[in-house]
Amino acid sequence: MASGTTFALQAVPAHTDGPASAAQVALLASEAAVQKRTADLEARFGDPWDTANPLGHGPILAADAKGRLQAAAEDLLDDFRLNAEFVPAALGGRLVRADTLARILRPVFRRDQSLGVGYGVFSLLAGASVWAGGSAEQQRWAADLLLGGGRLAVSYRELAHGNAFLRDEFRLTQGGKGLVLNGTKRVIINADRAQGLVVVCRSSDEPGSQAHSTLLLDRGRLPAGRVKDLAPYPMVGMRGCRMTGLAFDDCPVPADGLLGAVGGGVELALKSFAFTRSVLPAMVLAGGDTALRTALRFAEQRGVGGRPLPRNPQARRTLAGAFTDLLICDSLSLAAMRAAGHHRGITGVYAAATKYLLPILLNDAVHELSVLLGSSIYVRDGEFGIFQKHVRDLPVTSLGHAGAAAALSTISPQLPALARRCWQPAGAGDTGDPSLFALRQDQPALAFSRLETSPDSDVLCAELLAAAGFLEEHPDLEFTAVLQPLVRLLTAELRRLRAACTTLAPLSRHCLANPQTYALADRYTLLLAAAACLGVWRHQQGGPDVFLARSGWLVSALLRICTRLGIGPLPAGAPAPEAQVFAELLRRHHQPSSFDLYDSPLAAAG
Amino acid sequence: MSTAVAAAAVLPAPSALAVLSEPVLVTPAGPWDTVRRELAEHASVVLYARLGDWLPESRPQEQDSAADAEADSALAPLLGRDFERYRGMTNQDVRARFLASRLLLKYAAGAVLEARPADIDLAYKPGGRPYLRGCDQVDISLSHTADLLVVGVTRRGWIGVDAELESRRLEGSAVERQICTPHETELISRIEQRRRNSTLVRLWTLKEAYSKAIGQGLRFRFTEFGFAPGARRMQVLRPDGTPGAGDEWSFRTWTVAGDYTVSVALFDFGFGDTADIAAQTMLDEGMVDALLREARRAENHRRTTG
């Protein structure tokens, strides 16, 4: 910031005890501290199945029907100071790592995805741009705003195949007296109640990657009459979220309202996406937990198709399959989030893969579960009414095709170089990175300014190859007779992918823009998911997470991934692994504990 | 631009299917422009085809295996990963229908995405539902019965289509009990005898279309949800006749090619219209250019230092 200019953001009262020391930072993200904060939030919300709980499923559904968030739930999150989780510890908040942040938000997303998104996750997404590209003053202002209970909203720019969330574009031009902002955007979450606005706008008519800039605006300092809120946008899901829009009409923008350099909008977005694209799906998958729990509860009480669960192998298979899908999702997002902390060059690719694949797996899983509930999927209240809410909310959090297209835009251009340099035993460069899968282990604090978008190695594909070797060397492990052929199928698929991607004409958008490339990118994300599962399993051997160290879930996960890849022939002999997964699912259901990698205790009726 | 205009441009039309045009008859030669136009205007389109139009010209029995191999070498790149499955099929009827329906799906997808049919990766969900891998800007659904192939394409959400011979005997069959909810049985008992069977066929196709749209095929039991035969606006009902799914679902039924009942079910995500679905414009220019520039820089760096 040039000296002598007045900083345009009005000071917000600081609610901070000052930046944390290195020791305090380490403590904030320690396994014990994360478990404590997660348990605290879980306990404050209480048992959602308890019909007397004012924050339970019944009141959540009632608020959703009215298109509102529950005021009491927002108060609870205020009281918990959830916003502090979105602010880096160096700025006085509690944000240290992506993976621990996602875990802390899961109690919120398990109950109500609208609450998670509508209360504040978009403050986090907006904040990521500020932490990654803002000046010290901008970071201080945004941190103080969030720590004081305020909100940030973010408006991303138009993408090639945008939708109502992304389509309209703001324009920044140089007027006589300085920068001027124009344009309308129909859907911006929390636009009407956020004091801080992160706005990505077109700042040049030139094609290419330097035509956009990012602004950080203080809503309170914008001249009245130059910015207008638009009416709420009606949605099928996430009805409780405030989805309003903004219209700027020749709105003057202070010169120091720029976040980063003019023309740096795309680069900054890619940097912040390397964080947001893995952390948000990692929270959203907790909605799948509730959908599965509801289906299981239903099947236990009423049976499926007239047959009780213990005598219904088809229903058990469906339930175990959905649990497996949640574990696949969590494994991939874990690797992506921990790659961010290690400043791996490939972080942006893994985050995009997470953003692409998780919505697909979660949507398919809840639809498979819907078969178990039968006509009860239409119930919008009572014990099972929460199921249809999660089914409706899931597609919205993923932005549909626009979200997938944006993720593929990040993966596709990198495929040729990854194929040539990384996807072979000799060229992998390393044997994977155990720290990516160490779900409870400490990790350096995430430095947003160092988020990487240029891959130098592909540790997940290296893990796939290393795990194949590991299995050959340990033929005595559980279910190896099934695991070995499955992993051979996957490594063969990686070879095919490599052959196909090396022939893609590199370095040209027009040559890449082809369904064949997108299909290869889709296959690559499935291989990454398989590699992540293998990594979690392999590096949990001898560790405290006994279920993850056993092979049942891994067999189930790899079978499901191979089916999606359409590769085979698949080895027979899955009933025993499946029974292991189902037994664990039942144990966690009755405990109760979470259907993810962490097996976290859930609030039960006292 | 006024707000009202902007809003109208993105709000999903409440009765998208009410204006959906009649199914379009297609052969490998098209008319693909019509298909693209229908999809642009109505967000969804239903295509139908004659089996014979989509089979490679039949060869006399005595032709040698060299000709077979030649035909196979042309089909292999077009069928992609389905080729192995196709080659393993022994029943000639099943084989022909499999081939024709895959070709139809690939041509239709290629036409709407403006890409070569061979570049389309036709994939299957774990439950068997076909989809276009990596191209979720459109959803597809396939049905075939006797001589008819039907494909649904939408750019709004999920689609399911189903076709049955109108003359198929359902009334009084064992199937009838598995199709109807108590509410439907009650409604059907009230309509005149001669219309009962066609009403059942219509119900059956609606139910198939709906369960295909949610990716469950016959796994979702047909007695768990229903419709009100004869209602002006079709909607999913619970077994007792009370409302089930909401307005995000719409349905339509036609008589096609004289003998067939064809139904379509459509789920609208509510994201509004993305009229442009071409594969060429799918990648974001700014993002891809930034990454390609970075890749070039890294490559040059490696060359100069390596």
Image (cartoon, coloured by chain):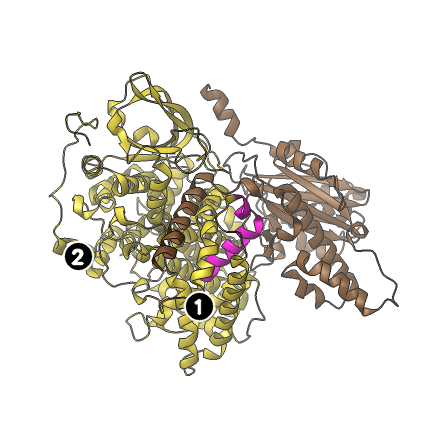
Chain colours: A yellow, B brown
Q: Residue at x 24, y 44 (%)?
A: A82
Q: Is residue A422 above or below residue B2?
A: below
User: Residue A190's image quarter?
Assistant: top left
Q: Chain of mark 1?
A: A
Q: Disc 1 on helix, strand or loop?
A: helix
Q: Does the magenta portion include A211? A: no
Q: Chain of mark 2?
A: A
**Disc number placed over residue A26 in the picture, else none:** 2
**Amino acid under label 1?**
Phe
Magenta residues (range):
A510-528
Instruction: Give percent across and percent down for residue A276.
Output: 34, 46
Q: Does the magenta portion include A518? A: yes
Instruction: Give percent across and percent down for residue A288.
Output: 42, 53
Question: In this orientation, does residue B185 appear?
Answer: no
Give the camera-side residue of B18 and A465.
A465
**Amino acid under label 2?**
Ala
Q: Residue at x 33, y 55 (%)?
A: A337
Q: Is residue B81 left or right of residue A362?
A: right
Q: Is residue B198 left or right of residue B183?
A: right
Give the mark nearer the N terminus: 2 vs 1.
2
Question: Do pointers 2 and 1 mark residues of a single chain?
Answer: yes
Sort mark 1 into few (<14), some (14-19) or many (20+) by Cα contacts within 10 Å. Answer: many
User: Which residue is identified by label 1?
Assistant: A582
Q: Residue at x 37, y 47 (%)?
A: A57
Instruction: Give percent across and percent down for residue B166.
Output: 78, 47
Give the distance between the C-alpha atoms of the residues marked 2 and 1, in whole angstroms: 36 Å
